[in-house]
Image: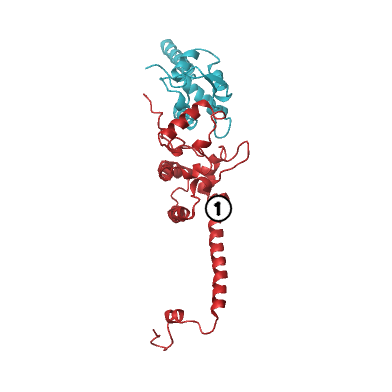
Chain colours: A cyan, B red
Amino acid sequence: MKKFAATLSFAVASLALTGMSTSALAQDAEAAKALADQNNCMQCHGLRKDKDGPAFLKTADKYRGKANAVDEVIKHITSGKKIKLADGTQEDHKIAKTMPPNDAAQLKNLAQYILSIQAK
Amino acid sequence: MTNRESGKPGWWAVLRRPSAKYSLLGLLVAGFFSGILFWGGFNTGMEATNTMTFCISCHEMRDNVYKEYQYTIHYSNRTGVRATCSDCHVPKDWTNKMIRKVKASYEIWGKITGKIDTPEKFEANRMQMAEREWARMKASDSIECRNCHNFDAMSQELQKKTPYKKHMEAKAAGQTCIECHQGIAHRLPKGFKKPGTEEEE
């Protein structure tokens, strides 16, 4: 019985751990991809390939393990701040739009998706 | 040309016979004004089917595409210029407008048979409907977009650098608006990948 309890508590603990590690991943990758397409993100960013803007993988690597990662990415895609293009010139970043406008859950989902990109 | 039973002239013979009762001027004036009435009525009716109120009188449009469109720049923007449904979806010139209106009779059949009468059915058919509309726009060199937008009217100073660069590349390559700008006023169909964004996945 003691052994069973130990196994059970181990299982619960590992489940909780798995839950924690996946919380940083996107909840709905398909919805995030659709939102990225709708906003033309992929015109300037590749998933793992630099275009005029850096690959999403670079962003993910930059913020990996950082607590403020999601907030930083959301700020990046909603504030229209100045960004540096591949050719060294500057431009205002496009402001990502959601339907309905400024939907926090959708933006968070997109940010989590970007941060979830892994090297192959 | 007489009616065999009664011996009276048939309707065709009556129509062909010169009038003995009305003056030529009377007939011309009556014809002229009834022509105006008929043509005016026809065009007014046609214009009524080009209003947003008409388009969203069906729940298929009101609950799906119209809702999405309300969140886009073509519905609401800084300067208050709105492009309504027909501005993008119905040609302005008379002949092509008539052709589009006649083709729209298929949409009435769709309405009667309930082809897209639930959100699920609408989504299931969205790709097919979008592709049909994109093909129509590409064939007309995106004329409905270009009624307002024009490569030559784009300001290099006012447009952001990256879009300007892409627009000039597109112009040189002879591309038309809809080849890149799909889903600007509506959601993109599920599974649609924008050209130029295909990727190693």
Residue B64 in view in this figure: no
Which image quarter: residue A68?
top right
Residue B146 vs A68, above or below: the answer is below
Residue A77 in view in this figure: yes
Outermost bottom residue: B7
Residue B30 vs A111, above or below: the answer is below
Callout 1, which amino acid?
Phe
Image coordinates of residue B135 in percent, x first then y, are 40, 43
Image coordinates of residue B193 in percent, x first then y, are 41, 32
Query: Which of the pair B169/B66 is nearer the observer?
Result: B169
Residue B39 vs B192, above or below: the answer is below
Image coordinates of residue B137 in percent, x first then y, are 44, 44
Q: Residue at x 48, y 43 (%)?
A: B119
Q: Residue at x 51, y 47 (%)?
A: B61
Under tag 1, what secondary structure? helix
Count every numbered label the image shows and give the total.
Answer: 1
Q: Which residue is mark 1?
A: B54
Mark 1 surroundings within 10 Å by alpha-carbon count, few (fewer than 14), some (14 through 19), many (20 or more): few
Q: Quick one: quadrant of the N terminus of chain B? A: bottom left
Residue B73 vs A104, above or below: the answer is below
Query: Which of the pair A117/A67 is nearer the observer?
Result: A117
**Which chain's residue wears label 1?**
B
Q: Quick one: quadrant of the C terminus of chain B? A: top left
Image coordinates of residue A83 in percent, x first then y, are 54, 19
Query: Which of the pair B187/A25 is nearer the observer?
Result: B187
